[in-house]
Image (cartoon, coloured by chain):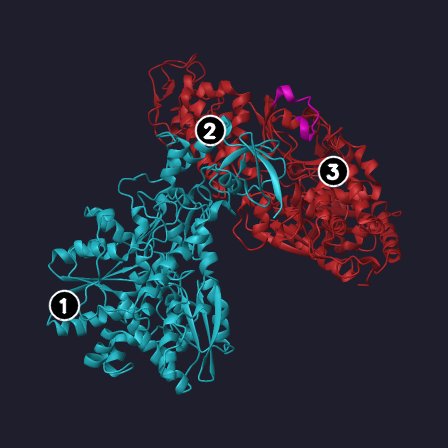
Chain colours: A red, B cyan
């Protein structure tokens, strides 16, 4: 590779590759470009084989000189993957299998006809939609800041990133003073995307103000919330963008080395990042005297073994140093005494991915997006009981209703929306009354949850909120590092009480103790994770107190989730006496009564069945095997 | 140091900047209950969450053990929020603690119990499942019972700081977290040197010495002639166990108590310390004379010997082959003493009262299995005295038994403190090499509690360089030089515990929580205070040099011949294991 040694060379290179990219997206007459989703979700659904098959078919059909097929990052609409997108028409095919490649090539590429059956079907209108931007899921999104380039460029080819404008922001920053860069970020209003929402510029300023021979920048890619995959997709889709963000940060605070801390469970992200760092080094964009300036910088990758607590910045620093991942007391803050005792700034992947936009387009343009105190966009991993599951990037200030019903396409199977859990294990549940709240850091906190890193799990009427609290508590208990006593012991005690309640053995005193304990953990714990650990309990108790009471007083689980408090019953009037339930019952606990089913001839051997609850293991096979809807949960 | 103005409970104070709130509060007369903090209130962990206080303007409660004071800070200790929070933290810890306080070996010294009282912890709060626990009793020196552990992390830090070997660490995660050697192995199957520094800082009964009181009881009951010997450092600290201030000499009363406990003879290990000097100084002179392996390194401390075998086996040729003094004493009692008194050595049971728990391991080494039969720590001796109803305050001062092995020199006394063995050896070596006593008996340059001390001695124009160190973190640098052949010392003294035996793993606990009458800085001064007991006793001795000990001279004349003789080699010297496995299989 030819090194890019100066600003001029960078701009020259950018122009060259930008026109190549442009050619790809707006093909010349007769030319086509196929891109295949290369995110973890789609790759695990064989999108790599699909890509190989497409390339093979292009060859077989002699189309090499006018059709290309490449991998891109993540389309975000994970429930519909793998995706194949055809340029210049921008036709988007969903749930494409390897076997479908032939038809795409024959019918679309050669025949010029859209393959109808592979188009997305809108869950509400039931209509097929051909183009990406016409799909509701994408309509309200703004996927060009943190997810910039994600479904457009090949994440393994630095030239495409340069073509899209990578390093232009860095180039601009390098021509500004370090303080000017920090001020720009401060003015943009960018806040940390990892959870707490601390103003990024202020963090940088602290580290900038400390005198030291060595400073470090650290990128926190230890994404641990259940169901969250924002950071993974950002790195997988456009690793260069994150590296550039880190470089700008390093220049601003005066660091020469940066560490990416990424979970080892993210092999694709790790490999693409490694590859990107290597390509940057080959081009001279990482190393000494970057773009001919005094700025020298190197990137290192450290893999996390998957402990949730290592997402806590001081535990993460310990882990990088090779120590057990346990949080450090603060003060001293990392900006003063961080990695190896040197001033360090730890920023989340998504935060860094925002930085190039801010520098390139200016704080003003960035700050125009969002609400008064929360600027820019936020990436959410939308999941749970929602039609359109996937990764979304939306401007701050959009309402939960828009997120769940417009982008998310509403709740499947006509069920009723109950709650949305945001902020992961540290967050809380928001309900119907919060649906029209504009999403920003402060509103979510005021509503009893938090932004967190961006996990958003939708729940419907079939979710038991006590069980949800128990799920998160089990997670926290498993993942507590064990250092401080309130979190280590307190969360265990909370889980014990919750288990008691879901087992129908709880008392109203337990409920009081649970609340008390939750508040103790909140006020006494050492780190942010401990201090927020009881949030799932407090927020569900706050919004769904009745459900707790139902478990305790009525010994009922209103959502029929807690097995001890629920039983299967056969409705006499609906039972036709076919015996399917009894035949499928593994516990042999369904018996035939003497009652003749409604409308059946008594001379037939059909008799109403009944479940003897004493031996029932509550597997639900009777319900799933009954064709008459006679088995219900009670 | 700059001063800052703070307010505690609304009262204005001026304190040094850089202090934690806990330290500052102590100086201003407030004791904030805390568990994980030691070292006078500076902590690097803040993990127990007991010392929480309110600071005006801070987000939530702050841990006073790590939070630095700042100008204008307003601290509230007594608010309802803070007192309830402290109590809740303790109650949570108690809910996962094996509360058999009545039988607990730490009873009377348990900081958790004391802090529970201070915060007003209520009974049966937050009861629930207990963390799966491990009881490790395999090691001769110490016992680990994780059911009592509160995971404060003091032991982990102490092991790392004092010995630099980090045997202990956290294992597992969350509620299952325990403190243990790697892989939850036993101390016996890990490269732990069994120095017991961890025991000294443990706030609860999670780490304790492996008691041998029962063995002594059984020997007494079986009618054996139970002979006791006490190490020099024991007298420097035993009085603390009976409420006396640190630095109070306890020699006479200790001897009186031992007499009342029914021991057949009460001897002073100092006699054997003198004997050690005779052998060790002789060995040194032979090495110098015969151009043997130098520097020679002392071998009195079994903690250090463990470290040597595990981590520096290459250095073994440098280490004196002398047994440690109490082992020599045992060997002489069972040979010379037994022979002279016509007692069957099998009827003799030798008990060593030691400031050390590594000695419990040492007496079981296969190189010298029969010299000593039981080792009790200073703390165990105090327990024995209390158990037998002896009132320390009323005890008279008595003398050690003067029976063949009775006399000891001032040189023997100072074995109990870092630099003491070196000083004792120099007194004798100087005499042997020059034929006259050094005009200044005290070699001040090897005294003091610094990590590494150096001195040189001019002997008839030949300058001998020596070095003294204690604690393996300090010794490491010297040992690396020895290993690399870069060391120009002739003689090095190494003791396992920082400060030497006066700070051994078997000494009375120094915990400010239980020492209301000591100075604020007692954790910084206790070693010097204990050392001063030994240096004053040295000064009071008529005989100050080992070679002038009349009983020693008699022993050589009647029994051993001369230092380094065949019989001396057999009884007083040992060998070391260069192939000691760090992680042997569990037997």
Question: Who is closer to the viewer here, A346 or B118?
Answer: B118
Tell me the distance, in whole angstroms, between the alpha carbons under discs 2 and 3: 38 Å
Residue B426, placed above or below residue A200: below
Query: In the visual, does B301 lie left or right of A235?
Result: left
Whether discs 2 and 3 lie on one chain: the answer is no
CB contact under 8 Å: marks 2 and 3: no
| Residue B451 is one of the magenta-drawn residues | no
- Is A387 or A457 nearer to us in this picture? A457
Look at the numbered disc 3 and give the secondary structure of its residue: loop
The reply to whether the C-beta atoms of the residues labelled 3 and 1 are less than 8 Å apart is no
Q: Which residue is mark 3?
A: A190
Q: Which range of residues does the magenta coloring cover?
A: A431-443
Question: Which disc, if any, is residue B346?
Answer: 1
Q: Dot 1, how many residues are within 10 Å of its Cα: few (below 14), some (14-19), or many (20+)?
A: few
Q: Which element carries disc 1, helix, strand or loop?
A: helix
Q: Can you tell which of label 2 and label 3 is closer to the viewer? A: 2
User: Where is residue A241 drawn, in percent x and y?
Assistant: 75, 48
Q: Are marks 3 and 1 on the same chain?
A: no
The answer to whether residue A138 is seen in the rendering is yes
Image location (x, y in percent) of residue A301? 64, 55
Q: Which residue is mark 2?
A: B84
Farthest bottom residue in view: B290
- Residues beneath discs 1 and 2 located on the same chain: yes
In the rendered structure, find residue A306 and report the number of the disc placed on it.
none
Nearer the observer, A588 or A228: A228
In screen coordinates, is B92 left or right of A414? left
- The local secondary structure at tag 2 comes to helix
Asked if one can make out residue A567 in the rendered structure from this viewpoint, the answer is: no
Residue A296 in the image, given as x and y percentages of width and height:
76, 58
Question: How many C-alpha atoms fall within 10 Å of the one at disc 3: few (<14), some, or many (≥20)?
Answer: many
């Amino acid at each position: 590779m030819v090194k890019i040694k100066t600003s001029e060379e960078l701009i020259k290179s950018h122009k060259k590759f930008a026109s190549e990219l442009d050619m790809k997206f707006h093909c010349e007459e007769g030319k086509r470009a196929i891109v295949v989703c290369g995110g973890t979700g789609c790759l695990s659904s064989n999108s790599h084989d699909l890509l190989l098959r497409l390339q093979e078919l292009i060859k077989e059909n002699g189309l090499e000189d006018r059709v290309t097929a490449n991998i891109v990052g993540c389309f975000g609409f994970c429930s519909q993957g793998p995706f194949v997108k055809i340029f210049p028409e921008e036709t988007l095919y969903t749930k494409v299998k390897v076997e479908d490649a032939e038809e795409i090539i024959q019918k679309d590429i050669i025949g010029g006809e859209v393959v109808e059956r592979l188009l997305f079907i809108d869950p509400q209108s039931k209509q097929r939609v051909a183009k990406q931007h016409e799909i509701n899921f994408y309509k309200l999104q703004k996927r060009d800041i943190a997810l910039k380039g994600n479904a457009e460029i090949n994440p393994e080819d630095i030239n495409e990133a340069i073509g899209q404008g990578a390093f232009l922001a860095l180039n601009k920053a390098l021509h500004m003073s370090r303080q000017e860069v920090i001020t720009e970020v401060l003015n943009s209003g960018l806040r940390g995307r990892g959870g707490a929402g601390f103003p990024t510029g202020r963090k940088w300023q602290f580290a900038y103000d400390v005198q030291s021979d060595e400073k470090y920048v650290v990128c926190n890619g230890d994404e641990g919330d259940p169901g969250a995959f924002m950071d993974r997709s950002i790195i997988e889709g456009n690793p260069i963008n994150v590296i550039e963000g880190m470089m700008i940060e390093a220049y601003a605070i005066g660091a020469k080395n940066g560490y990416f801390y990424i979970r080892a469970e993210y092999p694709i992200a790790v490999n693409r990042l490694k590859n990107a760092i290597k390509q940057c080094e080959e081009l001279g964009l990482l190393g000494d005297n970057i773009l001919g300036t005094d700025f020298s910088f190197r990137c290192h990758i450290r893999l996390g073994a998957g402990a949730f607590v290592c997402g806590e910045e001081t535990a993460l620093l310990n882990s990088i140093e090779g120590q057990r991942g346990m949080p450090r007391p603060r003060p001293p803050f990392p900006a003063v005494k961080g990695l190896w005792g040197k001033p360090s700034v730890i920023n989340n992947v998504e935060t860094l991915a925002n930085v190039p936009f801010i520098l390139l387009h200016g704080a003003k343009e960035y700050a125009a997006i969002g609400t008064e105190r929360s600027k820019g966009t936020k990436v959410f991993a939308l999941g749970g009981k929602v039609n359109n599951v996937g990764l979304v990037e939306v401007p701050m200030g959009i309402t939960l209703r828009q997120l769940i019903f417009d982008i998310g396409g509403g709740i499947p199977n006509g069920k009723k929306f109950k709650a949305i859990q945001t902020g992961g294990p540290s967050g809380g549940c928001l309900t119907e009354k919060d649906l029209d709240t504009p999403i920003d850091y402060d509103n979510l906190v005021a509503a009893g949850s938090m932004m967190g890193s961006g996990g958003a799990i939708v729940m419907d009427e079939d979710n038991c909120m006590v069980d949800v609290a128990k799920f998160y508590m089990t997670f926290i208990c498993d993942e507590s590092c064990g250092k401080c006593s309130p979190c280590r012991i307190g969360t265990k005690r909370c889980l014990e009480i919750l288990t008691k309640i879901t087992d129908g053995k709880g008392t109203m005193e337990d409920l009081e103790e649970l609340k008390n304990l939750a508040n103790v953990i909140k006020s006494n714990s050492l780190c942010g994770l401990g201090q927020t650990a009881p949030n799932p309990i407090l927020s569900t108790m706050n919004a769904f107190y009745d459900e707790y009471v139902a478990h305790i007083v009525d010994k009922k689980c209103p959502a029929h989730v807690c097995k001890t408090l629920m039983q299967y019953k056969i409705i006499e009037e609906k039972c036709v006496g076919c015996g399917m339930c009894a035949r499928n019952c593994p516990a042999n606990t369904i018996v035939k009564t003497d009652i003749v089913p409604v409308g059946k001839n008594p001379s037939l051997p059909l008799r109403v069945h009944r479940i003897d609850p004493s031996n029932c293991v509550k597997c639900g096979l009777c319900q799933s095997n009954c064709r008459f809807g006679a088995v219900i949960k009670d | 140091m700059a001063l800052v103005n703070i307010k505690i409970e609304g009262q204005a104070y001026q304190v040094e900047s850089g202090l934690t709130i806990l330290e500052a509060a102590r100086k201003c007369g407030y004791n904030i209950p805390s568990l994980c903090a030691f070292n006078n209130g500076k902590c690097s962990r803040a993990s127990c969450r007991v010392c929480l206080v309110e600071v005006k303007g801070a987000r939530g409660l702050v841990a006073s053990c790590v939070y630095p004071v700042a100008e204008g800070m307003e601290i509230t200790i007594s608010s309802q929020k803070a007192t309830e929070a402290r109590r809740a933290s303790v109650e949570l810890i108690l809910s996962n603690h094996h509360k058999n306080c009545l039988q607990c070996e730490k009873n009377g010294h348990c900081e958790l119990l004391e802090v529970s009282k201070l915060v007003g912890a209520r009974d049966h709060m937050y009861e629930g499942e207990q963390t799966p626990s491990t009881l490790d009793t395999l090691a001769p020196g110490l016992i680990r019972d994780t059911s009592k552990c509160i995971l404060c992390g003091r032991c982990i830090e102490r092991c790392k700081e004092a010995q630099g070997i980090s045997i202990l660490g956290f294992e597992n995660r969350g509620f299952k977290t325990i403190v243990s050697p790697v892989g939850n192995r036993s101390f016996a199957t890990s490269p732990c040197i069994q120095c017991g520094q961890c025991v000294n800082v443990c706030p609860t009964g999670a780490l304790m010495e492996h008691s041998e009181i029962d063995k002594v009881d059984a020997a007494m009951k079986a009618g054996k002639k139970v002979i006791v010997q006490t190490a020099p450092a024991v007298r420097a600290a035993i009085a603390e166990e009976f409420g006396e201030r640190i630095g109070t000499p306890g020699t006479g009363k200790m001897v009186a108590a031992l007499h009342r406990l029914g021991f057949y003879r009460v001897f002073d290990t100092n006699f054997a310390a003198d004997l050690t000097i005779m052998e060790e100084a002789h060995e040194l002179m032979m090495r110098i004379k015969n151009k043997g392996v130098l520097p020679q390194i002392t071998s009195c401390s079994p903690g250090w010997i463990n470290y040597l075998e595990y981590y520096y086996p290459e250095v073994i040729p440098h280490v004196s082959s002398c047994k440690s003094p109490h082992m020599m004493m045992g060997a002489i009692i069972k040979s010379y003493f037994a022979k002279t008194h016509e007692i069957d050595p099998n009827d003799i049971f030798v008990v060593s009262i030691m400031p050390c728990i590594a000695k419990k391991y040492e007496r079981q080494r296969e190189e010298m299995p029969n010299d000593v039969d039981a080792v009790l720590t200073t703390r165990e001796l105090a327990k024995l005295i209390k158990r037998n109803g002896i009132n320390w305050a009323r005890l008279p001062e008595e003398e050690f038994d003067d029976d063949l092995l009775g006399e000891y020199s001032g040189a023997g006394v100072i074995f109990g403190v870092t630099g003491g063995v070196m000083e004792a050896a120099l007194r004798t070596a100087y005499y042997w090499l020059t034929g006259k006593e050094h005009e200044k008996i005290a070699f001040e340059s090897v005294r003091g509690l610094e990590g590494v001390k150096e001195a040189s001695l001019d002997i008839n124009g030949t300058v001998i360089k020596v070095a003294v160190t204690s604690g393996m973190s300090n010794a490491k640098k010297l040992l690396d030089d020895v290993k690399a052949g870069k060391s120009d010392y002739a003689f090095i003294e190494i003791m396992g515990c920082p400060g030497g035996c006066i700070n051994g793993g078997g000494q009375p606990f120094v915990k400010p929580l239980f020492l209301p009458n000591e100075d604020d800085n007692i954790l910084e001064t206790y070693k010097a205070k204990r050392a001063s007991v030994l240096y004053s006793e040295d000064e009071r001795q008529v005989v100050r040099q080992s070679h002038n000990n009349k009983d020693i001279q008699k022993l050589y004349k009647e029994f051993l011949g001369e230092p380094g003789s065949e019989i001396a080699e057999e009884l007083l010297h040992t060998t070391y294991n260069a192939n000691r496995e760090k992680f042997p299989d569990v037997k």
